[in-house]
Image (tube, helix red, strand yellow):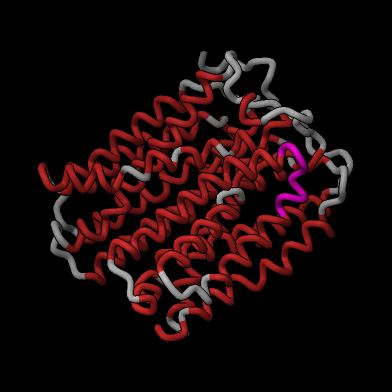
Amino acid sequence: MAGAVTMDMAPAAPASDDLPLGRRLAIFALLLASEFLYGWAWNTVDVLRPYVRGTLHLSLIQAGSMYSAQGAGALTGAVVIGQLADRFGRRLMLAMLIFGYGAMLLLGAVVQNYPELLAQRFLLGLFMGASFPVGVGIYVNLFEAHVRGRLAGTLNVAFSLSIVSLGLAMNWVGPQDWRLLLWAGGVPPLFLAGLAFVLIPSHSAVDRHHVASGKLPIGELFRPDVRKRTLLLALMTGLNFFGYEAYSGWLTTYLTGDRGLSAADAGSLVAWQFAGNIVGGFVWGWLADRFGRRFNAIGFMIASVAIVAYLLVPTDIVLLRIIGLVYGGTLCASVIWGPWLAELYPPHLRSTAASIFNWGRVISFFAPLITATLAGSVGLPIAMATASVAFGAAALIWINQAETLS
């Protein structure tokens, strides 16, 4: 029932008692740097797509499948490496995945054909998909529950800033030099990985809790007493990914097609949503620390209404900017999901539990196909409006789950 806290939860675990605050902040700074580089590596799949396509002579479908391969790798990595972190230690897995996505991004500079590109993007996604659950498992064990939302919001900003930086860097290199951006994002992680061993002591609070030998961590998420919760949380994250793809994925197409706006105006409106996301990460992180994890479900409800309003209002740039700002700011109410998912399960399952966030990617794989089919029969605006239903349904699931913050 909503608000119930079962014996297997760890709703208010204390901060680490064996590491001073300065060391814990240094470890979090490492996570921030890792998040920035992860965001850089992840978004090369979109930013560099036209240049990769031209260099390797790919079709549109082949170029688009770069994301599918990377997404499949991310889902696999979240599930597999998240469990390895709970079994063999988060310190070791953090270093491995940082080094891994740096090396795999560099590998993208030497691929020569389409099969090699798909393999490279899958392996890149494999390491990047584990960044979220492993990082959550680390800072949840280092900091008190009442600051974890703000930490999650700060990490969200680091990811967003990486997108801005990658976009600016594109203005400094020519199309023929796109591989330089792979080098710029791939070399630093090779050195950053070593800092994980320097900053995180062995046998610290980061790795205090382990899954017993011989056990499969993910199996504990489907014990009879928590199975329903796990399935509902997976559905909730899937609805989130579906909603994002159904609306944001078609936004530029909608603005330049149905609305008849120029590419410059469409880009400006997307930028306003992006600005809302940066600010919203801090706001919703603070709100979750102040009023509880379920409070942020209000954000999804507002986002659901904002989507419908965006599709119905007249084509007024100022009005669309305001609604877009609200949508972008409320969409990232989910920044608290990482700590919250970890808090809902026993301490030794924190990285595995946080990986539930990525399970929803399975549903998102079908979003473009479903919305494209709907757009062909009832129009793009109605197809995009399914995002409102998805976010509303996710909010209902969210608000009916257990609260973990006293």
Question: How far across and down, in percent of the image, does residue 224 sit?
Answer: 58, 14
In the rendering, at what x and y percent does residue 20 appear? 87, 48
Q: Residue at x 55, y 31 (%)?
A: 293
- Quadrant of the image occupied by residue 290: top right
Residue name at image x 52 percent, y 50 percent: 74
Q: Nearer the viewer, residue 386 or 282?
A: 386
Residue located at (40% from left, 30% from top): 395
Q: Quadrant of residue 348?
A: top right
Quadrant housing residue 192: bottom right
Q: Is residue 170 above or below residue 252?
A: below
Task: Locate residue 318 relative to residue 107 in the image: left or right.
Answer: left
Front residue of this view, candidates 351 and 115: 115
> What stretch of residues is rendered in magenta?
86-94
Chief secondary structure of the magenta portion:
helix
Q: Was residue 60 drawn as part of the magenta stretch in this picture?
A: no
Can the viewer see residue 161 in this picture? no
Report the label total. Answer: 0
Quadrant showing the C terminus: top right
Residue at 68%, 32% (x, y): give it: 349
Question: Can residue 261 be seen here?
Answer: yes
Q: Position of residue 355 (x, y in %)?
A: 57, 39
Indicate left or right for 186 with 27 as reference: left
Measuring from the top left, give residue 248's x and y in whole percent.
32, 52
In the image, residue 381 above or below residue 299: below
